[in-house]
Amino acid sequence: MLKNIPTVFVNGKFSKDPATVTANDFFFPRLNVPRNTAASLNYTLGISLARLDFAPHGLNPPHTHPRGTELLVVMEGTLFVGFVTSNPKKIFTKVLSKGEFFVFPIGLIHFQSNIGQTNAFAFASLRNQNLTLITIANTVFGSNPPINPDVLAKAF
């Protein structure tokens, strides 16, 4: 073990030595630049942040975040968003415009779709530094080995 180097944990994650922390550790200057929608920023302060870019009619397919509630803020464009509950079986949807936000409760299956004719983008923040994304269709229909078709037929 290295001597004189403190081990610092924040929310169970390794963090920096408090003596070396600067304002830049709390700052990210490039959220105005479109990027890979699979990329996100994970902070050890208990939050995650992602920029979501949508082509016209683009879709962020049904998925869930089992570890955190999500807050989505539309920055440009028009998004159709929603989530479903299982007990009772109900869907909650809304059309969001620039400056509006929507909350997806922890663990519920939700989606976003650009219903406009132009590009759209939004910021998603989750109350957990471990983003954990489970895409429903990829998980159910893309398993290896595949789920027995009889099971899928009965379920769907």
Image (tube, helix red, strand yellow):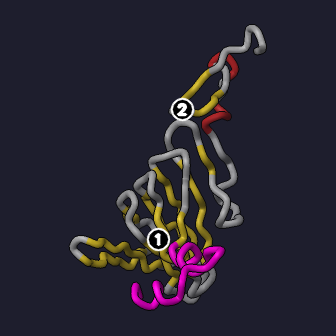
Locate the N terminus and report the quarter of the image it occupies.
Answer: top right
Q: Residues within 10 Å of mark 2 (few under 14, many from 20)?
A: few
- Three-letter code, disc 2: Gly
Q: Is residue 6 left or right of residue 83?
A: right
The reply to whether the magenta stretch includes residue 151 is yes
Q: Is residue 145 left or right of residue 62?
A: right
Q: Which residue is mark 2?
A: 12
Residue 119 in picture, x, y percent from top left:
61, 79
The reply to whether the magenta stretch includes residue 84 is no
Residue 54 in picture, x, y percent from top left:
60, 76
Q: On screen, 23 above or below 108? A: above
Q: Give residue 83's quadrant in the image.
A: bottom left
Q: Residue at x 46, y 65 (%)?
A: 64
Q: On screen, 76 above or below 3? A: below
Q: Which residue is mark 1?
A: 98
Secondary structure state at the residue bearing disc 1: loop
The part of the chain drawn in magenta is 136-156
For the image, the number of numbered tags is 2
Q: Residue at x 61, y 79 (%)?
A: 146
Secondary structure state at the residue bearing disc 2: loop
- Three-letter code, disc 1: Lys
Q: Give residue 24's quadrant in the image.
A: top right
Q: On screen, 83 above or below 4? A: below
- As drawn, the residue found furthest toward the right would be 2
Residue 56 in picture, x, y percent from top left:
60, 86
Question: Is 111 in front, or is 63?
Answer: 63
Q: Nearer the viewer, mark 1 or mark 2?
A: 2
Question: Is 117 in front, or is 143?
Answer: 143
Question: Is 77 in front, or is 5?
Answer: 5
Q: Residues within 10 Å of mark 1 (few under 14, many from 20)?
A: some
Q: Is residue 14 left or right of residue 2?
A: left
